[in-house]
Amino acid sequence: MSFVASNPIKNGSSIIIHGAKIEEITLTGTLNNGKSIILKHYGITDVPEEKSNSVPTEFDLSQNYPNPFNPSTTISYAIPTDGFVSLKIYDMLGKEVATLINEEKPAGDYTISFNANNLASGMYIYKISSGPFNQTKKMILMK
């Protein structure tokens, strides 16, 4: 693969080259001071795949991981349409102990971390609400 700049390359500018398997890059061009430049780079053999931009087709609230946890855990969820999302944590008496999300979100898959350093060991409930979707799950904090 080779690239020839049609205009002088300005100081501080960058050129991005995308490809599935690039084994060698040769860049030839002229700097804005009139000097020629040839840049060769070898050894790029793999480029990570881009994440899919697919939108989930249904609401989902996953079980936190790890569970039991100490002191932090991860909660994943999916929303198929743009909308207001609320994700809250409650103790077993129904008292709200944390609000993780309380805002508009575009459709997509999400992961959020919850740190329970300031809470006592025990079972907690996490609840997501978004449009018509409401779901709760249990998690256990073991200190």
Image (tube, rainbow, N blue to C red):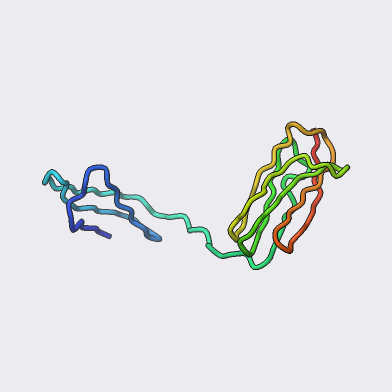
The residue lying furthest to the right in this view is 93
Residue name at image x 74 percent, y 47 percent: 88
Residue located 85% across and 44% down the image: 94
| Foreground residue among 39 and 110 | 110
Left or right, 10 with respect to 140, comes to left
Left or right: 91 as drawn, with respect to 98:
right
Closer to the camera in the image, 20 or 117 = 117
The percent coordinates of residue 75 (x first, y second) are 69, 49
Q: How many marks?
A: 0
Q: Residue at x 48, y 58 (%)?
A: 49
Q: Position of residue 67 (x, y in %)?
A: 77, 45
Quadrant position of residue 128: bottom right
Q: Is residue 100 above or below residue 108?
A: above
Q: Quadrant of the C terminus?
A: top right
- 105 and 68: which one is in front? 105
- Which of the 4 image quadrants contains residue 6? bottom left
Q: Please state if 27 lies on the left or on the right of 135 as rendered.
A: left
Q: Position of residue 96 (x, y in %)?
A: 79, 42
Q: Quadrant of the N terminus?
A: bottom left
- As drawn, the residue found furthest toward the bottom would be 57
Coordinates of residue 121 in the picture (x, y in percent): 82, 35
**84 in relation to 97, above or below:** below
